[in-house]
Image (cartoon, coloured by chain):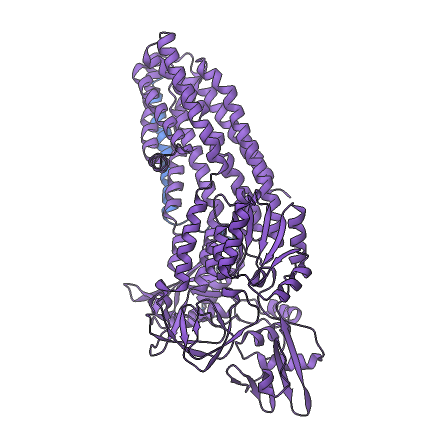
Amino acid sequence: MDILIWLIPLALLLGALGLWAFIWAMRSGQYDDLDGAASRILFDDDLKKGD
Amino acid sequence: MRGLGLDEFYRRREGEAGLLKPQDAPIADFASLARVNDDGTCTLELMVAGLTCGACIWLVEQALAQEGDVLRARANLSTRRLSVTWRGEAARADALATLVARLGFRVAPFSPACLRASEDAEGRELIRALGIASFGAMNVMLVSAAVWAGSDMGEATRHLMHWLAALIALPTVAFAGLPLFRSAWRGLRAGQLNMDCAVSLGILATCAMSLSETFRNGEFTWFDGATALLALMLLGRVLDRAARQRARQAAAELLALQDGLVTVLGQAQPVPMERVQAGARILVASGERLRLDVVLEDAQALLDTSATTGESLPRAYASGDALAAGAVNMGAPFTARVTRAAADGSLAAMGRMLEQAEQARGRYTSLADRAARIYVPTAHLVALATFLGWWLLAGLSWQAALVPAVAALIITCPCGLAIAVPAVQVVASGALFRRGVLVASPTALERLASADHVVLDKTGTLTEGRPRLLPGARTEGDLREGASLAASSRHPLARALCRACPDSAPATGVREVPGEGMILGETRLGSARFVGAEDTAGLSLHLARPAVAPVAFRFADSLRADAAAAVQAFQRAGLSVELLSGDAPDVVARMAAEAGIMLHTASATPAAKAAHIAALQAQGRRVLMVGDGLNDAAALAGAHVSAAPAEGTDLAQAASDFVLMGGGLLPLAEAVERARLAQRVARQNIALAFGYNIIAMPVAVAGFATPLLAALVMATSSLVVIGNALRVGRR
C-alpha cells in the first residue's frame, strides 16, 4: 500500500489543477458570453483593416 | 457595409425585400461617455439592442475593425454589451456609435441598470462555489469509494483515508457552503425555517458526525454525502438564477433604451432627467416622451396621453396647462417649465406606490417553501428521535448513536427537492423565452398557473398602440407620394404613413412646418387645416396637390393580429376575459366586440383600475392583469400575476411578472398552459423526492444505511427529478 503515498497526492494535485483552470477561466471572462462563444469559432480572421 | 465581402448578398436581399433602411440616428451624446485610458486610448461601452446571433456580433466587430483607428471591438452576445477601444479623440465616440446604428442596431449607453444585470457578482460567487464544491465532492468520493470497496483494507489505511476525506471536505464546505449558510441565516433571522436551514443543518451535522467518526476511526465517514449534497444544492441555485438571467438582462436592455435624456434650454448637451431641477425650461421634440411634470409655456401643444390615461386620440393643450410625465408629443416641439424634479414627480410617486404593492405580493409562498415547511420539522424530529432512541433506549454511546441519526438527516436531505422546482423553472422559462415571454419573478409561473381571470388593457395591449393606415379611396401613387414627403418627419402619423409604404424614396427639399405638415413646392401633406381640406374628426393626414382634390389618409389604432385568437385561447384555458380601459366607451365597446370580449369597462382612471383589480381579488378571483401604460402600473402591481408588452412603459414592466417580447398576446395565453404543466411536474417532482425519502428513512433510522446507499439515493432521485422536469420543455 506504499504506493498510496504517491498516488493520493498525485490525484489531489491533478484535481486541484482542474479547479485552478476552472477558476482561471472564470476570472478571465470566458464564461461571460456563452452564446457568443459558440459562434465565434466560425468567424474568419483574415479580414484586414481598410480592405 | 461595403468591403466585408457581403456586397453580393445585400444586392440580392435588397432586390427581394426592398431597401434596407437604417434605424434612427442615436440621440444620446456618446463622446462624454467615452473613458480615456491611461495610455491615451479611449474606450466606449455601449448597449446594442438587436444582437441576436453570432453573425450580428461578427458584423458589428468587423465594421468597427475596418475603421483605421479602432484597436479593439468586442461584442458580448449574452449581455448585448459592446466595448470599443480606439486611439485618438473621445469625440470619435459619436461617429463609432452612429456606425453601429447605421448597421441597423439600436445603441444606448451601457447604463448602471445594464451593468447590474450583467456584472452579477452573486451569480459569479455561486458558480465559483459550485466549481469548488464539485471538486471537493469528486475528490472525497475518490477516497470514499476506496473505503467502500476495500473490505480488506487495514485499520491504519482506513484511518488515513478518513483524515484525507476530512482534509478535503472541511475546507470545501467552509468555503463553498457560504452562499447557502448566508441564506439560511437570513431565513432564521426572519423567523422562517426554509429549505436552506434544513440543508445547512444537515451538511454541518454530517460534517461534525464524520469528524467524530474520523477521530474514533469508525467504519465509515459521511463527508462524501455532505459535499455531494452541497454541490447539488448549489447546482439548483445556479440553474434557478440562469432561468431568470435572460429576463433580467432583457429588461435592463429595454430600460437602457428608454433612459431619459432631456434637452434643457441653455445647456449645450442633453441632461439626464434625474439631474433636471424644478424650474428649468426644457424643449420637448416631436415624438419625444415627456419624462417630467411640466407646465406648458408655448401657445399650444398636441400630446398623446394614452400611456397615462388610456385615451387613444391625442389631446390639445394650451399655454399654462399642467402636463403629467408619460405623455408623448404628437405635435410640434414645444418648450415647457419643469414643475417638479424627477424624484418628486408623478412617476416617482407611482414608483413608490408600486414598491408597496410589490411587498404585499412578496408574501406569496411558493410550492417549494410549502413543501419545506412540512418536510423540515418532520426530518429534524425523526433525526432527533433516532438519536435519543439509539442513545437512551438501545444503550449506544452518544457518538455511535449520532451516526444513524445524522445518516437519517442526510439521506432525507432533500437533494431531489432542492433541484425539483429549479429544474422545472429552468426548462419552463427556457421554453417560454423561445416563444418571446420573459419570466421576471421567481414565483411568476406558479401564480400564472393558478390565475382564473384575465383583465386586459386596451391601448397598446389589446391594440397595437400606434396608428396604422386604414384603407380608403386613394391610388398607389397617392400613397407613394405621401410617404415620400412623410419620410423626413418624426411625427407619429408621418411615421405610420411611411410604414405603410416602406419602399418609397424620401423626397428631397421637403420643408416641415412643425405640428402642421410638410411642404414640397406646391404639394402639401399635413393636418386638414394646413392643406385647406374640410375638417374631419379622428387621426388623419391630408395630401394636397395642385389641380387634384385632396386625398385623406385615415389612421386608427387597430387590434393586434393575434388578439382574438389570444382571447379564445384564454377562454379555452378556463379563464374569463375582461377589457378595462381608460378610453371612451364607444371605442372600448367596439374593440371588445372585435376581440370577442363580453365584459368591458371604459373611462377607468388609474385609481379605478387598481380598485377594480382589488375588488376582484377580494372576491377570491386570481387576476392576470395585462397592461402597458403608466395608468396600468398600479393595477399590474396589485394583481395576482401580471404581464406587460416589451414596448410598454418601463414602469409597467417593472410592475410585471412577465414581459412579452414579441408584442403578441397569444404567447401569454399559451404560457398559461405551460405554467400549469410546469406546476404539475413540480408537484410530481416533489412527490418523487418525498417518495425516495420515505423508503430511505426507515433504513437509515434502523442503522443499516451506509454512505454508499446515501450516494445512490441522492444520485438517482436527482436524475429522476431532472428527467421529469425536461418534459416541460417539449412540444
Shown in purple, the chain is: B
Asked if residue B245 is positioned above or below residue B538 in the image, the reply reads above
Residue sitting nearer the eye, B124 or B136: B124
Viewer-proximal residue, B245 or B444? B444
User: How many callouts does the rendering have?
Assistant: 0
Q: Quadrant of the C terminus of chain B?
A: top right
Considering depth in this image, is B604 or B275 the residue closer to the camera? B604
Residue B567 position within the rendered picture, expressed as x and y whole percent measured from the top left: 65, 53
- How far across and how far down the image is residue B622, in percent? 55, 45
**Image hue for chain A:** blue
Q: Is residue B520 left or right of residue A29?
A: right
Q: Quadrant of residue B298?
A: bottom left
Location of residue B268 with respect to A7 vertically, above or below = below
Regarding residue B245, the answer to whether it shows in the image is yes
What x and y, as percent, mark residue B420? 51, 34
Q: Quadrant of residue B383?
A: top left
Q: Is residue B26 above or below residue B543?
A: above
In depth, the one of B19 and A11 nearer the eye is B19
The reply to whether residue B110 is visible in this rendering is no
Quarter of the image holding residue B161? top left
- Residue B657 coordinates in the image, percent (x, y): 50, 50
